[in-house]
Image: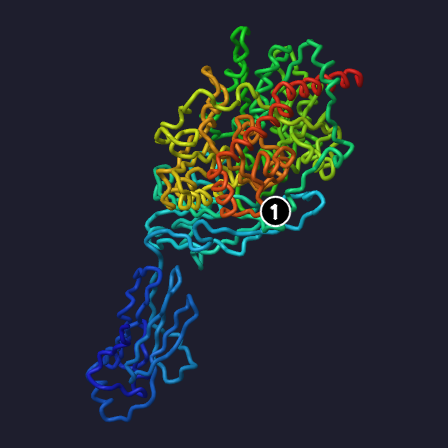
Amino acid sequence: MALVSWALRRWLLSTVALGLVRVAGLPSGAATRDRVHLEILEPRNGAYYRVGSAVDLRVEIIVPPDTLARWDQEPREAAYICYRADYFLRHGCVSMWSKTGITLRDPPIGKHSVQVWVTQDQSVVPEARYGVSFSVGSRTFRFLQPEPFALLTTSPAQNPSLGMSAAPPKATTQHALEFVIDYNFILGGGTLILTSGSGRRGREDDDDELYRIDKESLTSQASPFVTRLQLDDVEPGTHAICATLATNLNASSRRVCTVFDVVFTPEGLAQHQYPVVDEDAPSQCIAPHREDLRLSAARKDPVRVTVVGTPTLDGQKMIWLRQIEHFQRRGFDFTFLHFSKPGYDAAALERLNSSLVAAANRQAGQPPREMPLKIQNLPTVSEEDLLELGLDFEGGFPRAERVAASIMEALSSAVEPTSWTAPWWQLQIDAFRKPNEVPDVVAFANSQSVSDQTLALAAEAAGVAVRVYELPNLFPKRCPSCSASVCPSTYACAHVARHSGLENVFVIPPGVDTDEFHPNSEGRPALCDALEISHGGDFKCGGCAVVGFVARLEPEKSPGLFVRAAKAVSQEATHCVKFLVVGDGSLRLPLEQMVADYGLAKDFYFAGVVNQHDASGNPMVETMAAIDVMVNPSLRAWSETFCIVNVEAMAMEIPIVSFGVGGTQEYLRDGENASILRESSPRALADAVLDLLGNADVREQMGAQGRRMAVESFGIALQMDRYEWLYRRLLSESRVEK
């Protein structure tokens, strides 16, 4: 620690010094030759210190020789050099005669100023002071809280009888987000952006910007660095906060992510594991009888269906692809409509189009055909247009999808359309019209936004007889213009009927082609070589077990819990284990970083999106054939209204490890075809996986029982019969009403 040193050839007399000190270039009133100069030697003005540094304050007083000569003949009195560090509210004084050092310990990130003066009365702060400024930052960005891979818990208040509420349960984390950043990097023209997704640029649906700081905003703020951001209303699942550091945001940039999981307490988890059986379902929930299905299948009059959705190949798209494939021979004609937004992923659209064409041409004996994919571009909307509607977006211009939803809300309630809303509204209507014809049925999935209501309104205005509201998740908006709603499970139907005010709700569970999804009997799966697994052993690939995760890499699927459990399994297993991740999404980059930090990169294989349809067969079946144990770690009951991939795994005799929330309880049976956990933790997942990997007989028994249930209750033909019955029934009712 440096001393507060003054270069005096002898001790100073305070009474003289106080009258002669020249501070910050301001004259004291004495003759120029008698002025005493006070200088700060350290820190230097504009100096930069790293976080955790101890900043030593060194001051020098330069006294002219004539003044010193006078001081030799006068008695010394008490005098002090005082300082004030404004940023962290520290101040103090030291005696001019003591040679005591001053150290400013652990100054926080930001811009600091230190002022010094000479005084006899410590309680008096003169206007004339000598000051310097310095900054504190970090050469490398790092997160402090939540710590990397933190695990937070929440126990929302729910209705124990149904495990349901009218809104998703959310948690306020006890940890704020804290971070440190290089102060000079920002002053040098750099930019820091914090996002709640992967931080990839050019994909507006991938991340949500939380915070941005650059040189302009830094210099305009009194307290330039926001180093704590409270994370409120966080739902259970895997979350990533990523920082993008760049001097040119259009070029490659460095990213740092922290990944954390929000999980339920055991009591909170139990509230979402309550199975809803048919006897508990409200009267609004309608399930077709077998005789109804037989009569409907005998009809062959053509039906035109338009499905509306995004390019993402999720569970709902798989249901529609199956309809496209199997309804062709029943006289149905399908079109897929996508309302495109600026900057949407062209690669996702291409994948969707390939899947649509493959599905349309998989039936043997049918002539080749193209599957119509209609892309309707939404017009650009200016800020002036929004102001014309009276829409107030405090805090900045909103992202494109929020703009679109708000515009649609305004359109649906506008009495007199404005000059630009009228064409917008007409565009929605025209999108449902093919040349010279209107579809009989329009089906679209719940997006939990007001755009669902306006979509149904536009279809009705276009003359579409039947508007079907698919509910792969909960909390839909009311839809007075919808003819019917379709739920994949009794659990979902009970929730929708009780909380959303929807009527005419039908239960149609998704189906699986059990002839296609079947246990592998053709030897070693092709994926085993990509996993670098040797031949010979008790597992499907031979020497190594394969633990699989098949889902979108999004927060609601809790992929972070899978990675954490994999770490424990890898450390404790008595045999080789590989981990297969099938799917893509906004969390892929943070998860890959997490896997690398855990030292598991050689044991993980990220397969990305695997289509279920191509010209050569079903790549998903070929991929899943290598899996010995499937893990479904999702905790959001309101998102897991069914989970078709579980039934696909059952059809392939793969045992499942799951928390058994939401609609999955209607087919997962603990100890029969799955291990249902009562604690939402990586430890519980790891223990269940290790138990199954260590007992081949149990894996075989669970797999056989899962296959039996999939064949008997969830065959694709049964699902198609139910949808055909629904479409024809609703069309018949609409004609009667006319």
Which quarter of the figure is the C terminus placed in? top right
Q: Between residue 694 and residue 461, name the one nearer to us.
A: 694
Q: Is residue 198 left or right of residue 662?
A: left
Q: Is residue 407 visible?
A: no
The N terminus appears in which quarter of the rendering? bottom left
The answer to whether any part of residue 729 appears in the image is yes
Residue 92 on image: x %, y %? 39, 77
Q: Is residue 513 above or below residue 272?
A: above
Name the colouring of the figure: rainbow
Residue drawn where x is 61% and y is 10% of the image: 329
- Residue 537 position in % (x across, y down): 39, 31
Kind of residue sitting beneath label 1: Leu
Give the side of residue 622 with respect to residue 713, left or right.
left
> Where does the image place residue 115, in percent across and percent down from the top left?
36, 71
| Residue located at (30% from left, 80% from top) | 100
Q: In which quarter of the view is residue 96 placed?
A: bottom left
Residue lying farthest to the right in this orientation: 737
Q: Is residue 388 left or right of residue 593?
A: right
At x 62%, y 36%, the residue is 669
Residue 114 pos. (x, y %): 36, 69
Seen in the picture, residue 466 relative to 160 is either above or below; the reply is above
Crowd rating for badge 1 (residues with CA inside 10 Å; few <14, some 14–19, many 20+): many
Identify the image quadrant of residue 491: top right
Q: Is residue 333 above or below residue 13?
A: above
Q: Which residue is mark 1?
A: 269
Q: SS for tag 1?
A: helix
Residue sitting nearer the eye, 604 or 111: 604
Q: Residue at x 53, y 40 (%)?
A: 633
How many numbered tags mark residues here?
1
**605 relative to 302, above or below:** below
In the image: residue 60, left or right of residue 87: left
